Image (spheres, rainbow, N blue to C red):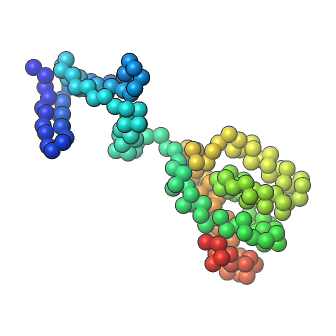
Amino acid sequence: MPDFKLTMEGNSVAINMKRIWTGVRRLEDNSGFALVLNCDGAEVVAHLANTELHILGLQCLAHMPEHSPRYTDAGVEEAFRLPARRLKHFDDRSMQTLLREISSDGLIDLLWYMADEELILQVLNNLSKRSAQLLMDDLNTRWHGKNPDLALECDAKRGRKAVLEIMEVVNRMVLEGELPDMLEQYS
């Protein structure tokens, strides 16, 4: 006799099994998947559409964070980028002043993480041709082919750190009167 217990509550069925085997297989007509739970030969099969299986997988990963790959979420990353969006509203003089105060490594990471063509062009236009070429070479060497919205968590942390460090410099320079306070206009 199989060692499991079925319970019903409202529209839900709960299955408690001790020795369980699970599997997923594609349905023959490619319309979805079969989620199979087997306990000593007794089988329960749930047919899931492609999106339902995807949602189930995400829900499983949410409950087991130690097993989930650490990828970024575009919405979360956008919240980290928001403070740095004001950089692209700096005039040329302000941008040049800022560029003298920040590290090139931090700038490279920030430009990749921001994924903002307008900001990249503004930075490049405020550098000498040689400095702009070196910056682009370094940016391509470090981040070529990596989308910050689909990046591993460790890469996204590097981008977030660059944003925080550079925005700390911006805030300090605003307080010292070296840069205009763009926060009120472009937040």
Q: How many marks?
A: 0
Q: Nearer the viewer, residue 140 or 45?
A: 45
Instruction: Give left or right: position of 100 versus 148.
Output: right
Q: Nearer the viewer, residue 140 or 26?
A: 26
Q: Is residue 64 visible?
A: no
Instruction: Give left or right: position of 167 versus 54.
Output: right
Q: Quadrant of residue 181?
A: bottom right
Residue 175: give x, y in percent of width and height: 67, 80
Q: Is residue 135 visible?
A: yes
Note whether 30 is above or below 146 in the view shown: above
Q: Quadrant of residue 10?
A: top left
Note whether 1 is above or below 168 in the view shown: above
Residue at screen point 77% across, 47% down: 138
Q: Nearer the viewer, residue 136 or 47?
A: 47
Query: Residue pushed farthest left?
Result: 1
Instruction: Give left or right: position of 146 versus 45.
Output: right
Residue at screen point 36% across, 26% down: 33
Residue 95: give x, y in percent of width and height: 78, 68
Query: Residue pushed farthest right?
Result: 129
Residue at screen point 57% across, 53% down: 157
Can you say which quadrant of the picture contains the C terminus? bottom right
Residue 27: give x, y in percent of width and height: 37, 21
Residue 142: give x, y in percent of width and height: 71, 44
Can you say which quadrant of the picture contains the N terminus? top left
